[in-house]
Image: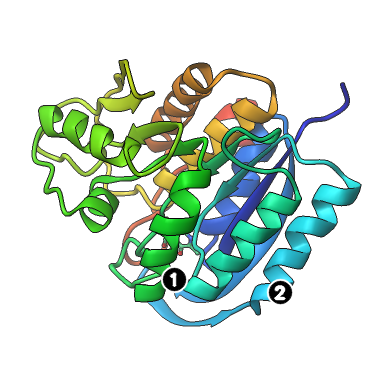
């Protein structure tokens, strides 16, 4: 096999911490060629998202189909999807490109709902389209606890409830659900839960004291996607993603006035970091 490729369907963060910039950096350091379908351009720094422009839905679909037809996609993921109209176009393009649950190309749906500053990254129609069109197409759904609440109404305050949330979300269509524990801040550890409809697999990790966590969710989902592109099973790729993001948070750095980015540099040789 040549170099594996992974596709991110995501928005641009001008601050380079999250979004497609985090995804491409992660793909690179995981040895995977990054393909991109840009959904939106955000005007962003560590103080917030100040403006944005969404890409026309047919251009988002066109990017997916162009790279799939010519270059081949070994795994795909979503990030910021911006609107219901873009989600509809993504669902149709993914079907044509054979991306999705029970299809040839595994599909990681990261249901990115808001920026870390709380700015919504899609509208009401986007939430309905995510539920109706993307959850049933997901090989793996990777919500954080805010996204669990948005999708299910469940307020998760402990590890037991993470299991309940995983069961509810699994009933909404994805093949696997990975509930992330980063927002369970009173828990001294950071134990994510993977559920396949029968078995719960706990993915333990340390909780770091750093405030600099921008892009953590994107990096986790991208490393998981890179693992799938390299031929790992979903449980193997989920463990790989957890390992990658724990190290990325451990090596995060301050930049700008507020929350700095997690690092993908940690996998480089020390003299290159
Ligand atoms: O971290 C989620 C995310 C994804 N995509 C874009 C973002 C953010 C968070 O700020 O800005 C473009």
Residue 225 in view, yes or no? yes
Q: Position of residue 98 (x, y in %)?
A: 72, 43
The residue sitting at 35% across, 25% down in the picture is 194
Q: Nearer the viewer, residue 271 or 241?
A: 241
- Residue receiving disc 1: 45
Q: Is residue 205 above or below residue 145?
A: above
User: Is label 1 within 8 A of ligand 1 (CB to nearest ligand atom)?
Assistant: no
Indicate the secondary structure of the residue bearing disc 2. helix
The residue sitting at 24% across, 30% down in the picture is 207
The residue sitting at 49% across, 52% down in the picture is 134
Q: Is residue 246 left or right of residue 145?
A: right
- Residue receiving disc 2: 58
Q: Position of residue 68 (x, y in %)?
A: 81, 49
Task: Please tell me how crowded label 1 is: few (under 14), some (14-19), or many (20+) other residues with Cα within 10 Å.
Answer: some
Quadrant assignment for ligand 1: bottom left
Q: Quadrant of the C terminus?
A: top right
């Amino acid at each position: 096999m040549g170099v594996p490729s992974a596709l991110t369907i995501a928005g641009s963060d001008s601050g380079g911490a999250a979004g497609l910039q985090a995804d491409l950096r992660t793909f690179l350091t995981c040895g995977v060629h990054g393909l991109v379908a840009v959904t939106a351009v955000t005007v962003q720094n560590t103080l917030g998202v100040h403006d944005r422009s969404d890409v026309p839905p047919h251009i988002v679909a066109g990017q997916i189909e162009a790279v799939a037809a010519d270059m081949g996609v070994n795994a795909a993921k979503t990030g910021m999807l911006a609107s219901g109209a873009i989600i509809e176009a993504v669902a149709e393009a993914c079907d044509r490109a054979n991306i999705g649950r029970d299809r040839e190309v595994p599909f990681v749906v990261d249901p990115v709902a808001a920026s870390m500053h709380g700015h919504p990254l899609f509208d009401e129609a986007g939430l309905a389209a995510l539920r109706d069109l993307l959850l049933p197409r997901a090989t793996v759904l990777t919500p954080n606890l805010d996204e669990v609440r948005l999708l299910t109404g469940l307020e998760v305050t402990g590890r037991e409830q993470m299991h309940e949330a995983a069961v509810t979300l699994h009933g909404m269509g994805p093949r696997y659900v990975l509930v992330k524990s980063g927002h369970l801040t009173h828990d001294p550890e950071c134990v994510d839960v993977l559920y396949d409809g029968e078995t719960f697999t706990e993915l333990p990790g340390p909780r770091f004291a750093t405030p600099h966590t921008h892009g953590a969710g994107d990096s986790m989902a991208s490393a998981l996607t890179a693992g799938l592109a390299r031929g790992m099973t979903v449980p193997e790729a989920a463990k790989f993603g957890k390992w990658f993001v724990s190290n990325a948070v451990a090596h995060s750095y301050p930049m700008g006035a507020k929350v700095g980015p997690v690092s993908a540099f940690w996998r480089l040789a020390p003299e290159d970091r």
